[in-house]
Each structure stands twice: as structure tokens, then as C-alpha cells.
Image: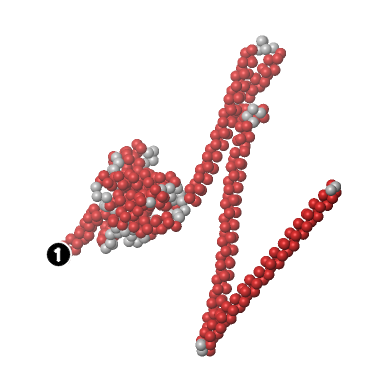
Amino acid sequence: MSWLGRNAVIGLGVGVTISTGLIALLIIKEAVRRRNRRRLLLHNTSSALQNEIDSAALSAAVSGLSPEQQVELRKTLDEVMKSVSSLRNEIAELREGLRDISTTIAEDVKKTVEESQRSRRRRTLMPRERSESMSSSSIYFTASAGVASLCDDSEVGYSTAYSNAESDYTDRETDKDGEDDGRDSEEEEEEESCATVLTLRQDDSQAEEEDDEDARLMVDCLTDIPSPELALLLAQCDLLHAGDSGKKAEGFQLLMENRPLYADNVEFMWRLARAYSDMCETAGNREEKRSYAEQGHYEAEAALTRNGLSADCHKWFAILVRLSSQYESIHGKLKSGRLLKEHLDRALALRDDDPICFYLLGRWCLEVSSLGWLERKTAATLYETPPTSSLNEALENFLKAEELNPGFSKTVRLYIAKCHKELGNVSEGRNWVQLALSTPAGANEDSDSAALQEELKALIDRTTDQSISSMNN
């Protein structure tokens, strides 16, 4: 068989195979189409049958109702449909609102990051250009000119260097002394230029460190947002803190058990410091009180280091400083008192409606106003401007605490009475003592409240004795 005949046979075989495959494909598609049609027909038939059954059941149920009940049923169904429709609309609006909020947040974050990067580039552009072009003549002469404006003889030194550089080619041996002077002046100018560049580099690094610190604070604030589990734990600890000594001890144990999980959260950290303060107040002996006070001081300092914009961190740091200062010398107490005043002022600057801060500030004013001669001399040696205060300032702070939360502390009213007594307002002090005695003792009373109460009872006893003697006369 020739070559042409073999090719014809091969082509004929290929054509027969392709046509057979096409025919088989058409047959399969037709079979699949008929099967889908039968399934659709069966589904429609079952759906229609189900609808007929449901309609029949509904008709049977409705037929058993009276006309008034049917009308009421229609009204109820209409209300249900309206409620469903309004609910769908509200869900759609809520989705749109959430989508808009997420878009806005993403745009704000992107804008903030871009502005931060842009400001960082603006800060670092000029110093880097100067440091990179240190060897160029324009920057060198600019630095030399800047130094020349401060030193009168630098310009003369520069011209001497220039003239000696020219004379070096003409008469080097006859003017060697002038050449040495020129070299010394040029070396001084180079050192001053390098010092200028180093200063610019230091400013650049400081600016970058400030930007990094701002970014770190922003990240810390975002990470300090409590999770739902942590929020529930913190709420439970707040309730236990408001209870008696047993509840406070329970709250302390709860915080210590969860410390490995939330030790880096500021809200958890300052509450742990507060729990140490509670345990210090309720401890039985001096060593336990000192241990709780020192450990609480450490926890409060860690919380304050993490977030210096929290009023609670400043407040409880001041409270723990006051508790731990009770076990220090005169020098330590004076330093702790200065630190206490500083952080109370910061806490009140961040939130000026805390009565406890005003109470502690009143205590500080009262203690400073009653310093003895030795304490005043010691404070004068420690500080250029020793702390000063008066009884009137202490009374103002105590009255501010009472105004913000009347009757929240029996101790506050006792100290108001003490200030009036020291100022000579005996009748006013007597009224506040009687008011304090009628106030129930709260969970936040100081340990020296009982001693203060015994001290001020003399005002009432004196009045009672005077009334009895007048009656006998």
C-alpha cells in the first residue's frame, strides 16, 4: 500500500472515532437532561402536594374559628409580617452601619500611620542629608561659617589657611611657620564641623526614639483594652474590694491566681496593687503590713510605668507610697511625702472627682502643716524649696472630699472636725464630731480612725460637762 493510501486510512479511522465520540456525548447529555426533567417534575409535584396539604390543614384550622377570631388572626399575622419586615430593615441598616464604621476606623488608622511616617521623614531628612554629605565643601563651609559667627578669630584662621595653601606652591620653605598655623586652624575647623554633624545625628536619634516611644505607648493603650473574660474578672474583684476583710482577701486570692494570664494589663495591675493595699490594712502584725505595702508599691510602680495616663495608677501608687513610708526614716518619709503629693496632683489632673484623692491630699496638707522643728530642718536640707501647707488647705481638701461623696467615710468627717478644732472653731468642730459619730463605719476607714475619734470625743464631753454644771447652778 502506498504512503498516500496509508494516510487516507488513518484519517478515516480518526474521523470515525471523533464522530462516534460526539454521538455518544450527545446521547449522554440527552439522558442527563431527561433525568433532570423527571427530578424537577417530581419535586414540583411533591411541593404542590405539600402546599395543598398545608392549605387544607390551614383551611381546616381556620374553618373552626369564629369570624372575630379569624379577623384577630389576620391582624396578628399582619403584625408579625410587619415586625419581620422592620427587623430585616434594621438588620440591613445595622450591617451598613458596621461596614461604615469599620471603613472609617481603617481609614483613620491608615491616615494616622501615614502622618506619623511623614513627620518622621520630615524630622530625619535634613540631619541625614547633612551627615551623609559631611565631606562636601558646601556643608563644610556652612559649618565653618556658623562657627565663625560665634568666634571672632575663626574667620581670620580660615583666611590664613587659604593664603598659606597658595604660598605652599610658591615659597614653601620660606613660609613654613605660616603653613603650620594654617594647618592648625584648618584642623580646628574640621573638628568643629564634625562636632556639628555629631550634634545633628544625636538630634536625629533622639527624634527617632521619641517617635518609637509614642508608637509604643499607642500600642500599649490598644493592648490594655480588657477582653470579655478579663472585664468579668475585674468587675468581680471590684465587688469584692467593696466588701469586708474576708471579701477583700478573696479578691486578693482571685487576682493572684489570674496573675500569670493578665500580668501585662494595666487594669489588672493597678487592681492588684489595690488588693495589696487592702491586705496591708487588714493584716494582723507589723511585718505582714510592711510586706504587703512594699510588694504593693512594686506592683503600683509597674502599672504606672506601663501607663502614665491612668488616674487610677497614679492614685494607688500614691496610696502605696503612703503605706510603705510608715516604715521609713524621717528622710524616707519626707521623700515619700513629696512623691505622694506629686502623684495625687497628677491623678486629680486626670480625674478631678475622686474623693479619696482629695482626702489623701488633705492628710498630706495636715501633716506638712504640723511638721516639727527637726522635720522642717531636714526638709530644708533635702530640698531647695521645702513643702509648705496650712490647716486651711487641709480643711478645703477634706470638705471637697465630703462634697463629692457625702458620708462616704467617717474618717473624713473626723478630720474636718480636727481641722476646725485646731483653727479654733470649737462649735463647728463639735458639730462635725457629732455628725461623724452618727456615720456608720465603712469599708474604707483608716486604722487611726478609732484613735482620732477618742481624741475628738473630748469636745462633746466638754460640752456635756458644761451643760450639767449650768443645770446644777
Residue lying at 34% horizontally and 56% vertically, measured from the top left: 241
Q: Is residue 366 left or right of residue 64?
A: left
Left or right, 94 with reference to 395: right
Q: Looking at this view, is 331 or 153 the one in front?
A: 331
Rendered location of residue 65, percent (x, y): 51, 87
| 194 or 304: nearer the viewer | 304
Vertical relation: 67 (above or below) 439: below
Q: Residue at x 42, y 55 (%)?
A: 230
The image position of residue 45, as x and y in percent, is: 62, 77
> Looking at the picture, how far across and down is residue 37, in whole percent?
67, 71
Q: Residue at x 43, y 56 (%)?
A: 229
Q: Tell me residue 8's x, y (percent).
A: 83, 52
Most distant residue in the front direction:
1
Quick one: label 1, few (<14), some, or many (20+) residues within 10 Å?
Answer: few
What kind of element bears circle 1?
loop
Vertical comparison of 115 with 460: above or below: above
Q: Is residue 198 left or right of residue 442?
A: right
- Which amino acid, by three-letter code, is at mark 1? Asn
Q: Please name the residue that numbered disc 1 is placed on.
A: 473
- The residue closer to the viewer here, 373 or 333, is 333
At 39% across and 38% down in the image, what residue appears? Answer: 384
Labels in figure, total: 1
In the displayed structure, 157 sits above or below 433; it is above
* Snapshot quadrant of residue 118: top right
Residue 340 visible at all: no
Q: What's the colour scheme?
A: secondary structure
Query: From this viewpoint, is residue 17 visible?
Result: yes
Q: Considering depth in this image, is 112 or 473 the residue closer to the camera?
A: 112
